[in-house]
Image (cartoon, rainbow, N blue to C red):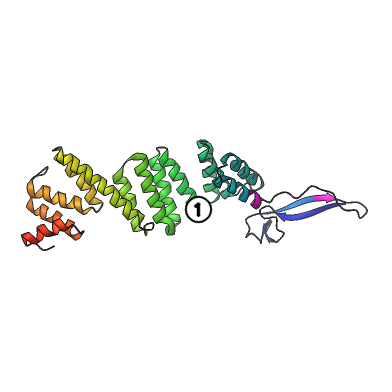
C-alpha cells in the first residue's frame, strides 16, 4: 500500500496553514510550501522500503552558504541551484548564487540572478546595494547610483552604511573624490557608519588640499584655488584658510580682503588656529 507524507519544501516540517488554495508552512513562517511526497509502499502489513530522507531546502541553503563562506564558490553555486529547483521563487537563493557568480566572474549570470532576486523581493535593499556595487565596479555609474539610492530609501537604518561603502567604491573605481565626498556627506546625514564617513571625508579633503599645495608651489595658482574650493566644500578648514590667504594677497584671484576675511572666518569657525590668530590680530570678530 502506497504511503504519502506532507512536508515543507524549506524545513521539512509538517506544520502547515491554508490560505485559499495555497498551503504554507507555519514552522518556518511560510518560507516554504507543502510538498506531497510518496515515501514508500507496503503490503500485508509489512514495513515499507525506501531510500534515506533527502535534505530539506533549508539544509541545502545552509550547506551552500557554508561552502560560499569557505571559498568554494563553484560548489556553492551548484548548491543554491538545487534550492532554486525546489523553491523557484526563493529570492535569497538567487541573490546568493549571484554572489557566487561574482567571484566566478560570470557577470551575465550575476546580473540575471540579482535581477531575479529583486523582481521576487523588490523591497529588499540589500539586493539593490549589491547590484549597485557591481555596476560601479564595471563602469555603469548612473545605474549604480540609482541602485544605492533605492537601497538607502528601502532600508533607512542601513543608509549610512550603504552610502559610505558606495563613496569608497566611487573613489576606488573612478578616482572622483568630489563625487565620493558628496556620498560621504549623505552618509553623515543618514547617521554615518560608526564615524567612518567623517574620517573618510577628512582623508579625501586632506589629499585634495595637498594637491593644491603642490599646484601652488608650482605657481599654478588657478589650479590651487580650484582644488582648495573643492576641499573647502568638504569642510576642510585648511582649504578655507588657504583661500583666505589667496584672496588677501591676490594670488590666483583678484585681491579682495573682504572675501579673504570671510574665508578666514569660515576656517576659524571650523577650528583653524592660524585663521583665528589672523582675525584676532586684525580685531575681526568671528
Q: Residue furthest front?
A: 70
Residue placed most toward the observer, 127 or 150: 127
> In the figure, 25 relative to 83: above or below?
below
Please report the residue visible at 36 percent of the width from the left and 44 percent of the height from the top. 170
Please report the residue visible at 33 percent of the width from the left and 47 percent of the height from the top. 180
Q: Is residue 225 visible?
A: yes
Q: Quadrant of residue 19?
A: bottom right
> What kind of element bears circle 1?
loop
In the image, taking residue 4 as reference, residue 43 lies left or right, namely right
Chief SS of the magenta region = loop
In the image, taking residue 250 as reference, residue 30 lies left or right, namely right
Residue placed most toward the observer, 228 or 202: 202
Residue 43 within the segment the image draws in magenta: yes
Please report the residue visible at 64 percent of the width from the left and 46 percent of the height from the top. 83
Q: Residue furthest right?
A: 44
Span colored in magenta = 39-60
Residue 160 horizontal/vertical position (percent):
39, 56
Residue 237 horizontal/vertical position (percent):
20, 54
Within 10 Å of disc 1 (Cα), the crowding (few <14, some 14-19, many 20+) is: some
Q: Quadrant of residue 281?
A: bottom left
Q: Which residue is mark 1?
A: 124
Residue 195 within the segment the image draws in magenta: no
Residue 207 horizontal/vertical position (percent):
26, 45
Q: How many marks?
A: 1
Please report the residue visible at 11 percent of the width from the left and 47 percent of the height from the top. 246
In the image, taking residue 4 as reference, residue 207 lies left or right, namely left
Tell me the quadrant of the picture where the C terminus can be found.
Answer: bottom left
Q: Is residue 255 visible?
A: no
Amino acid at each position: 500500500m502506497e504511503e504519502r507524507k506532507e512536508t515543507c519544501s524549506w524545513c521539512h516540517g509538517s506544520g502547515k496553514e491554508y490560505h485559499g488554495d495555497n498551503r504554507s508552512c507555519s514552522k518556518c513562517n511560510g518560507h516554504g510550501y507543502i510538498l506531497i511526497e510518496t515515501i514508500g509502499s507496503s503490503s500485508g502489513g509489512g514495513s515499507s522500503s525506501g531510500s534515506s530522507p533527502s535534505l530539506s531546502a533549508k539544509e541545502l541553503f545552509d550547506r551552500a552558504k557554508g561552502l560560499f563562506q569557505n571559498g568554494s564558490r563553484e560548489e556553492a553555486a551548484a548548491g543554491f541551484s538545487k534550492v532554486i529547483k525546489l523553491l523557484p521563487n526563493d529570492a535569497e537563493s538567487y541573490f546568493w548564487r549571484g554572489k557566487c557568480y561574482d567571484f566566478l566572474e560570470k557577470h551575465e549570470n550575476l546580473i540575471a540572478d540579482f535581477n531575479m532576486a529583486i523582481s521576487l523581493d523588490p523591497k529588499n535593499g540589500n539586493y539593490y546595494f549589491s547590484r549597485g556595487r557591481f555596476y560601479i565596479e564595471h563602469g555603469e555609474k548612473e545605474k549604480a547610483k540609482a541602485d544605492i539610492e533605492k537601497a538607502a530609501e528601502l532600508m533607512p537604518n542601513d543608509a549610512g552604511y550603504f552610502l559610505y561603502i558606495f563613496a569608497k567604491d566611487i573613489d576606488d573605481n573612478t578616482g572622483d573624490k568630489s563625487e565620493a565626498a558628496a556620498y560621504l556627506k549623505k552618509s553623515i546625514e543618514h547617521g554615518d557608519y560608526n564615524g567612518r564617513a567623517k574620517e573618510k571625508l577628512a582623508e579625501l579633503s586632506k589629499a585634495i588640499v595637498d594637491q593644491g599645495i603642490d599646484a601652488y608651489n608650482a605657481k599654478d595658482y588657478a589650479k590651487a584655488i580650484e582644488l582648495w574650493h573643492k576641499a573647502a566644500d568638504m569642510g576642510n578648514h585648511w582649504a578655507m584658510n588657504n583661500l583666505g590667504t589667496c584672496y588677501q594677497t591676490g594670488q590666483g584671484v583678484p585681491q579682495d580682503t573682504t572675501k579673504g576675511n570671510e574665508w578666514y572666518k569660515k576656517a576659524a569657525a571650523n577650528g583653524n588656529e592660524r585663521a583665528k590668530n589672523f582675525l584676532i590680530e586684525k580685531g575681526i570678530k568671528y
